[in-house]
Image (spheres, grey):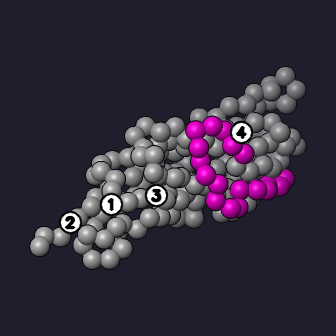
Amino acid sequence: MKSKEYIISSIFIILSLFILSDQKAYGTISITVNGTWSELIDGMDLQGPPGSDLNNTYESSTTAIDIGITGAGSRPWRVNVRKVDILWPTSFTLYVRRTSDGSGSGSISGGNEYKEVIGVDNLFFSGNENRQGIKVQLKLSGVSAQIPLGNYLTTIIYTITDD
């Protein structure tokens, strides 16, 4: 009996599309996001012998994404997150969590637990003043051998606003 090999390639592209402008009184707060995550899922990811299902959940490294916030002055801000699916099975669920506070003046809070990324903006974390080196981890669940072989793609959009 031939063994089945399942190959699913999941590619996550992280964009730096961000908005905020209150230039009259304070200048512009900006956010920079660097990093990507891709996962090749194949026969090595089977839960058991050939014919068994694939592992359901995959996580990036804890430092996959690096976020920096500048131009905040002493103002509070919030970072929202959403996704735009390009080719994405409905069974896939994508999550983000903040794994470090980064460095800089001010403070940061929230986002330490995995938060599902959906198609509308949701609060990810908040803080005040400038921060650099904020690390983010991604998690994918809902993977199954029932999903057709292919390359799957979604985009995560991080947006910063005055709080």
How far apart marks 3 and 2 lie (CA) works out to 20 Å
- Secondary structure under badge 3? loop
Q: Which amino acid does label 2 sit on?
A: Lys
Measured from the top left, where is residue 13 in percent x and y? Answer: 47, 45
Q: Please identify the residue farthest to the left as the structure is shown.
A: 1
Residues drawn in magenta: 106-123
Going from N to C along the chain, the mark reached first, 4 or 3, is 3
State the image quarter where residue 6 is shown: bottom left
Q: Which residue is drawn at 13% across and 70% down?
A: 2
Q: Residue at x 31, y 71 (%)?
A: 52
Residue 32 showing in the rendered view: no
Say which residue label 4 marks.
160
How far apart marks 1 and 3 lie (CA) works out to 10 Å
How far apart marks 1 and 4 lie (CA) works out to 37 Å
Say which residue label 2 marks.
4
Measured from the top left, where is residue 66 in percent x and y? Answer: 60, 53
Q: Which amino acid does label 3 sit on?
A: Gly
Say which residue label 1 marks.
145
| Residue 122 among magenta residues | yes
Going from N to C along the chain, the mark reached first, 1 or 4, is 1
Residue 99 showing in the rendered view: yes
- Secondary structure under badge 1? loop
How far apart marks 4 and 3 lie (CA) works out to 29 Å
Q: What residue type is labelled 4?
A: Ile
Say which residue label 3 marks.
142
Going from N to C along the chain, the mark reached first, 2 or 4, is 2
How far apart marks 2 and 4 lie (CA) works out to 45 Å
In-front residue for pair 112/71: 112
Q: Disc count in the image?
A: 4
